[in-house]
Image: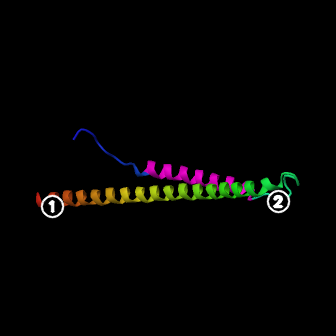
Amino acid sequence: MTGAFSADPERLRAHASGLAGYADRLAATGARLPDGLGEQSLGAFTGFLTAGLGAAMAATLDAFTHAASTVDAVGTGLRRTAEDYQRTDDDQAAGFARLDENAAGGAR
């Protein structure tokens, strides 16, 4: 084998925490966005633009909500992956400890 593989659960958890912060910031930014325009926001002459801009603003708000949710889901997945790696490492270490105990007991 030419390469080695390792996974550091603590680094995965740290990255997941960073993603949670990004998700919170995306959600907060989306919450500050206006969700539409009033009928006469642009005046009577350009009122026809209000409907189109309102739809674009709603789509942008939905995009921020979706992005925040997706980033949060990735962070949750990373935390679960870190727990899986940690559990696997702990289980393997316990197995080796039992082998050591059995070998020490058999050598007496």
Q: Secondary structure at mark 1?
A: helix
* Mark 1 burial class by Cα count in 10 Å: few <14, some 14-19, many 20+: few
The quarter of the picture where residue 48 lies is bottom right
Q: Residue furthest left?
A: 107
Q: Main secondary structure of the magenta part?
A: helix
Would you name the residue on which mark 1 appears? Answer: 105
Residue 5 placement, left or right of 64: left
- Residue in view at x 11 percent, y 60 percent: 106
Q: Secondary structure at mark 2?
A: loop
**Observer able to see residue 108:** no
Would you name the residue on which mark 2 appears? Answer: 38
The quarter of the picture where residue 4 lies is top left
Magenta region includes residue 30: yes
Report how many numbered discs are placed on residues in the image. 2
**Closest to the observer: 90 or 55?**
55
User: Where are the magenta residues, as a range?
Assistant: 10-35
- Residue in view at x 66 percent, y 54 percent: 60
Quarter in which the N terminus is drawn = top left
The amino acid pointed to by label 2 is Gly
Question: Which percent across, then down, holds residue 84?
Answer: 38, 59
First in residue order: circle 1 vs circle 2: 2
The amino acid pointed to by label 1 is Gly
**Observer able to see residue 47:** yes
- Residue in view at x 62 percent, y 55 percent: 63
**Closest to the observer: 28 or 108?**
28
- Residue in view at x 54 percent, y 54 percent: 71
Residue 85 placement, left or right of 106: right
* Labels 1, 2: front one: 2
Question: Which percent across, then down, holds residue 69?
Answer: 57, 59
* Mark 2 burial class by Cα count in 10 Å: few <14, some 14-19, many 20+: few
